[in-house]
Image: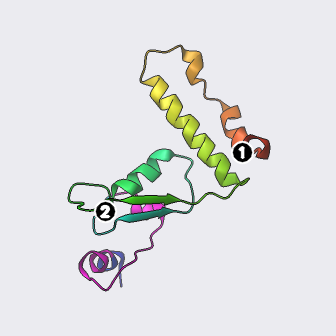
Amino acid sequence: MDRTALFSRFCDAPDVQVLLISINTGAVGLTLTRANVVHIVEPQWNPAIEEQAIARVVRMGQTRPVTVFKYIMAESVEQGVVKLQQRKTRIIKLSMQDRDESDADFTLDTFKFALDPNEWN
């Protein structure tokens, strides 16, 4: 069965309760309002990718509350990635405001902390 047929089956067949897709597949061009639970098991360096994947479920036509679960293991690289996501989001918000440029200093050091276990706690 090809991808389009699988998505159609998920959307149309009441006996299909789960659709497992990679975040890259699920982030663009799909309407998955039949779903109401999203599980993110691998955080992305770019938080917008996760937001786009969630937006496939949370969109016009959704009639139920949507729950998003993110699985992050303590003291892992993924925990560092989440901190990096938070910092990127902060930098983006700061860049939209009238702030001093030093507030949005984004350098290679920003990435280094994601791999440093001392920064995860």
Residue pictured at 44% horizontal, 70% vertical: 21
Kindly identify the residue that appears in the image at 20 percent across and 59 percent down: 61
- At a point 49% along the width and 15% down the height, the residue shown is 99
Taking the image as shown, residue 51 lies to the left or right of residue 87, namely left
Span of residues in magenta: 7-28
Residue type, label 2: Leu
- Residue 6 figure quarter: bottom left
Asked if residue 100 is positioned above or below residue 12 in the image, the reply reads above
The circle drawn on residue 120 is: 1
Tag 2, which secondary structure? loop
Q: Is 95 situated left or right of 103 in this image? A: left
Is 55 or 121 nearer to us in this picture? Answer: 121
Does 95 appear above or below 24?
above
Answer few, some or many: residues within 10 Å of disc 2's Cα (few below 14, many 20 plus, some between 14 and 19).
Answer: some
Q: In the rendering, at what x and y percent does residue 20 appear? A: 45, 73
Element carrying mark 1: loop
Q: Reply yes or no: does residue 47 show up in magenta.
A: no
Q: Residues within 10 Å of mark 1 (few under 14, many from 20)?
A: some
The outermost residue toward the front is 65
Label disc, if present, on residue 30 of the rendered structure: 2
On the rendered image, what quadrant is the C terminus found in? Answer: top right
2 or 1: mark nearer the eye: 1
The location of residue 42, given as percent across then percent down, is 57, 60
Q: CA distance from mark 2 to mark 1?
A: 34 Å
Question: How far from the left and from the top, in percent, is residue 87?
Answer: 58, 35
